[in-house]
Amino acid sequence: MATATKDPAADPELDLFDPQVQQCPYHAYRRLRDEAPAYRLPGTDIWVVTRYEDVRRVLTDVESFPSSAGNTPYRTNVRDLERAKKVAARFAEKGWVPAPTLAGRDDPNHRQMRAMFNEAFKPSRIKALDPLVERLAYELIDGFLADGRCEWVSQFCVPLPLYIIGEQMGAPREDIWKIKRWTDAFFQRISMMLPEELEMEMVDREIEGQHYFQAIFERLRKEPDDSLISVLVNTVIEEWGRPLNDNELHAEMMADTFVGGSETTTNALAAGMKLLIENRDVWAKLRSDPDRYLKTFVEEVVRLESPVQSLMRFCAKDTEIGGITIPAGALVNVRYAAANRDERMFANPDTIDLEREKAGAHLGFGSGTHHCLGAPLARRELWWGFKAVIDRFEDMEFDEGNDFAYHPHFLLRSLKQLKIRFTPRRA
């Protein structure tokens, strides 16, 4: 099998763990697509895959690239292994060791577990939430409309999806910001960017959340209700002969419900506002005919800024990608964000095109058996979020005090804050 003809490793712009590179990684992604479509990050066993067709292949070839280490020859390095042992020990001592999440399972186990989630996120449930999403989007903006300015992330982008998933899960509104603190700890812990001391601090904070949710699990086992959390607690997975146990439930509370169900949509709402202010022609066109253009705008935001920049797979056997051999046992970083700007797939990939055909062909929600099950709800939240902006704002601009900084994170893209000024739309 062939090997890479160029070695871009000496280029500091290709260190995807560098917080400065993460502020705007798209030049690095282009270099990797062109020169090393399967690229081993120096000093690691992580191979980054960046071209659209290659990313899609990894996502759909579950035999070569499974979601769990399983029987692959994967071996983590000693440093990571020792830290992982400390993390697991802390969870075991003070709380519950999170089991593999839905995203970290392979069939048939994944399919059996996902069937329960498919029921919980079935179209009729999403449709029933639509009036709530619409009402909340307008209420949030109306709450600060008279001010003429806001911190867009904390005042709109965070509460919209967070309140919705809280409603689904049956969480009391007054508890939602406590839950946000715990899910922020999970967000930071999985960033792959924390020093050990800070990672353990985030573990302790997650454990606080575990004890909060444990009381809810135990209550719902005795007194089920119609909330999504009750479905997860009480539904018997037929092939398993049991419902999810506590360790599995605690993993799902963080990864696939509160973080998966809110954090990524928050980041897309923030990215979309930034893009609208930076692209005045897009704002004007979107306002001129939202019925025609809003759906495509939502897809373009997810494609361009990819709130989930990447996730991991394992390599079960030596496999050639882009003429480069990824060895068995490697950890494969599936870089959705790079694939979504691949000029081999998308014309003018770095720009918003409200006329783009097949705008939903991006990989922002994944592909294959692990396609994001919350994608329909996320799309509705984004649609109503930006529809409320169109209906309430005449115009908007960046306010003073923005540094446009992103949280350091190897997997997700999250704008810290976005201060804007706006003119309320005339009645």
Image (spheres, rainbow, N blue to C red):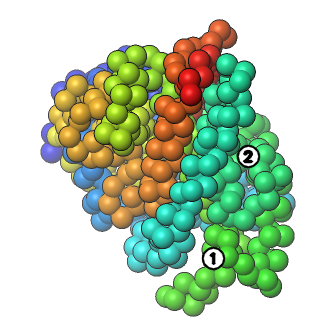
- Residue type, label 2: Lys
Quarter of the image for the N terminus: give it: top left
Label 2: few (<14), some (14–19) or many (≥20) C-alpha neighbours in 10 Å:
some
Residue 382 position within the rendered picture, expressed as x and y whole percent measured from the top left: 49, 43
Q: Which mark is residue 231?
A: 1
Residue 253 position within the rendered picture, expressed as x and y whole percent measured from the top left: 66, 61
| Residue at horizontal 66 percent and vertical 82 percent from the top | 234
Residue 26 position within the rendered picture, expressed as x and y whole percent measured from the top left: 37, 24
| Residue at horizontal 57 percent and vertical 90 percent from the top | 241
**Closest to the observer, 233 or 57:** 233
Q: Which mark is residue 82?
A: none
Q: Is residue 314 above or below residue 403?
A: below
The image quarter in which residue 11 lies: top left
Residue 316 position within the rendered picture, expressed as x and y whole percent measured from the top left: 34, 60
Q: Which residue is mark 2?
A: 180
| Residue at horizontal 40 percent and vertical 28 percent from the top | 287
The image quarter in which residue 405 lies: top right
| Residue at horizontal 78 percent and vertical 54 percent from the top | 173
Q: Is residue 121 above or below residue 327?
A: below
Residue 215 visible: yes
How far separated are the C-alphas under marks 2 and 1? 22 Å
* Tag 2 secondary structure: helix
Residue 74 visible: no
Quarter of the image for the C terminus: give it: top right
* Tag 1 secondary structure: helix
- Residue type, label 1: Val
